[in-house]
Image: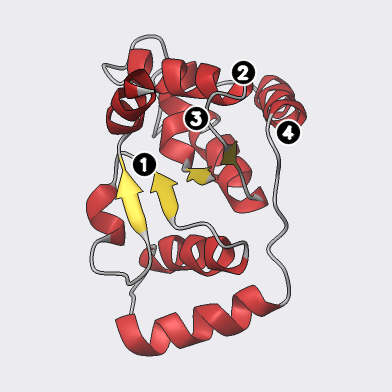
Amino acid sequence: MILLDANVLVYASNADAPEHVASRALLGAAFKGRLAAALVPQVLLEYFAIVTDPRRTQHPLSAEDAWSQVESLRASLPVLEAGGRSLAALGELVVRRRPAGQDIFDLFLVAQVRGHGIATICTYEVSDFAGIPGIRAERPQSLLDDLSLD
């Protein structure tokens, strides 16, 4: 199983983005069960924050439309709970990695997926997860290429 990062969801919903085709295809494969993928609430909230923010997207969605998209994603893919151990695991990562600012959110994703035995995060920000033991970050196209080999 893999975790889909918020940027994959954002690009899948933005037809103007160069990353749209690969993101949409990957999401389609997950919806059809060809790729075992999951989300966590944090990813859904990050998605909502991005698609409703006029500073981050050219055509922001209304809160209602964005929430409708979140509900659709929730209905189509498993949403894994963070679990009580995630904050303790995050604390261990903070001590080792010493994040600053927004970097804490990527580390919290790592803490959450580890708690569910997930080792792969699908993202366009692969470098954000570099050097974290037990975590592999893959771009959507790479995972699509692997699917076509099956």
The amino acid on which the numbered mark 2 sits, given as a three-letter code, is Lys
C-alpha gap between disc 4 and disc 3: 12 Å
For marks 2 and 3, give the CA distance: 16 Å
Q: Sequence order check: which comes first, mark 1 or mark 3?
A: 3
Distance from the alpha carbon under mark 1 to that under mark 2: 20 Å
Q: In this figure, which residue is indicated by the disc labeled 4?
A: 74
Q: Earlier along the polypeptide chain: callout 1 or callout 2?
A: 2
Regarding residue 68, the answer to whether it shows in the image is: yes
Tell me the element at label 3.
helix
Q: Residue at x 39, y 34 (%)?
A: 55
Q: Earlier in the sequence, mark 2 or mark 3?
A: 3
Mark 4 or mark 2, earlier in chain: 2
Q: CA distance from mark 1 to mark 3?
A: 9 Å
Query: Where does the image place residue 97, in percent across and percent down from the top left?
Result: 31, 81
Tag nearer the camera, 2 or 3: 2
Which residue is at 71% across, 26% downward? 76
Residue placed under numbered mark 2 in the picture: 32
- Crowding near the residue tagged with mark 2, few <14, some 14–19, many ≥20 C-alpha atoms within 10 Å: few
Q: Amino acid at mark 4?
A: Arg
Q: Are marks 1 and 3 in contact (CB under 8 Å)?
A: no
Residue tagged 1 = 123
Local SS, label 1 = loop
Q: Nearer the viewer, residue 142 or 85?
A: 142
* Mark 4 nearby-residue class (10 Å; few <14, some 14–19, many ≥20): some
Query: Quick check: can you spot residue 54?
Result: no
